[in-house]
Image: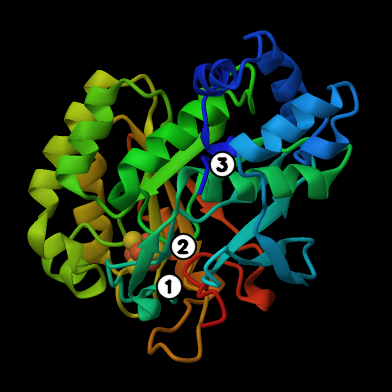
Amino acid sequence: MNDHILGLLPDEIEKRLYTIGEKRFRKNQVLNWIYNNHEIDFYKMSTLSQSLREKLSTKFENFLPEIIKVDISRDGTKKFLLSLVDDNRIEMVLIPNKEKNTLCISSQVGCARNCGFCATASMGLIRNLEVYEILSQVFLAIKELKEKKLTNIVFMGMGEPLDNLKNVIKAVRILQDKQCFSFSSRRIIISTCGIIPKLKELADNGLKIKLAVSLNSAIQEKREQLMPVCKKYPLTELKNALLDFRKKTAFHITFEYVMIKDFNIGQEDTKALLKFLGDISCKLNVIKWNEVSSMPFKSPSEAEVAEFIHGMENSSFAVTYRKSRGWDINAACGQLAGNY
Ligand code: SF4
């Protein structure tokens, strides 16, 4: 199979054009069609000569995943089920807001990390997504939005992005490239469960992105129960890796905390959180657990949420209570499972 055009950086496209006898500047015309006119069908690139269109179609792949199903939530959130070239399926979620449109994308088919609160975990890991498969989600969302602008990308869909780091890094480079998707580094968030060696690799890579860490408990034993990754990469080591990451990169770290009734929102949980986060330049997003019928956890009441947040009133970090979006279509945090 040829390289897919969405998985290539501009200079890689330029080199390939050169090998088929085309002038290097043709790259600009092709990129303009893809990223400004959102046209990926070479035969519809009407300003290119017929022979160039034919050459492009023999040199590059340009197929897109098929949209199998779209579920629309009462709050406007849309969940897309996509079929990949090998019939594997992934989900992406488009979350519209007044001033921004956020796309939550997948980085793997399934996931190996087995977090206890996550529906994707039940699939196990099937495979990593290729760069073009990660970016096809963005391309499809831009087309879907038509005249509205896609403003934010979050790697919080299916999969652990740091387990597919090489492809995720290249995808981010293409997302940020001025001739390609041209997203600002402030508008891209990579979320991780805390794979320490990969966090170090990401920090050393110099890639500018925002980092979110799915924390869910600052107590070692509890976090191990929820997130097996914590057995291999304990909280103390995670904290050191994050302090190091913070030193090497410009942005605050965001911690995500799924609140589960009678499990991680008591006084000892608050105390542990205040200690763990107190000296990290960060913010904390808390979100209510979205009940999934196959899982034992329960969602807390609003009063329980208020009490938990009140306990962190004088903390050094900001606490934001994020309302879940798309819960009625299983598109909310922890609910993506590709309809497997
Ligand atoms: S929460 Fe993320 S890392 Fe954990 S199993 Fe789900 S997709 Fe994987």
Pointer 2 with pointer 1, Cβ within 8 A: yes
In the displayed structure, 246 sits above or below 178; it is below
> Which color scheme is applied?
rainbow
In the displayed structure, 176 sits above or below 191; it is above
Under 8 Å from ligand 1: the CB of mark 3? no
Under 8 Å from ligand 1: the CB of mark 2? yes
Please state the quadrant of the image where ligand 1 appears.
bottom left
Helix, strand or loop under label 3: loop
> Where residue 98 appears, x then y in whole percent?
80, 42
Helix, strand or loop under label 1: helix
Residue 85 falls in image quadrant = bottom right
Q: Residues within 10 Å of mark 2 (few under 14, many from 20)?
A: many
Q: Which mark is residue 4?
A: 3
Q: Looking at numbered disc 3 in the image, what kind of residue is underneath it?
A: His
Comparing 23 with 315, the one in front is 23
> Where residue 112 appears, x then y in whole percent?
28, 68
Q: Tell me which residue sits at (31%, 76%) in the image.
A: 116
Q: Looking at numbered disc 2 in the image, what kind of residue is underneath it?
A: Met
> Where residue 307 appears, x then y in whole percent?
43, 64
To which residue does mark 1 refer? 120
In the displayed structure, 47 sits above or below 272; it is above
Q: Earlier in the sequence, mark 3 or mark 2?
A: 3
Q: Residues within 10 Å of mark 1 (few under 14, many from 20)?
A: many
In the displayed structure, 189 sits above or below 323; it is above
Say if residue 121 shows up in the picture.
yes
Question: Mark 3 to mark 2: distance in Å?
Answer: 22 Å
Question: Mark 1 to mark 3: distance in Å?
Answer: 27 Å
Q: Which mark is residue 158?
A: 2
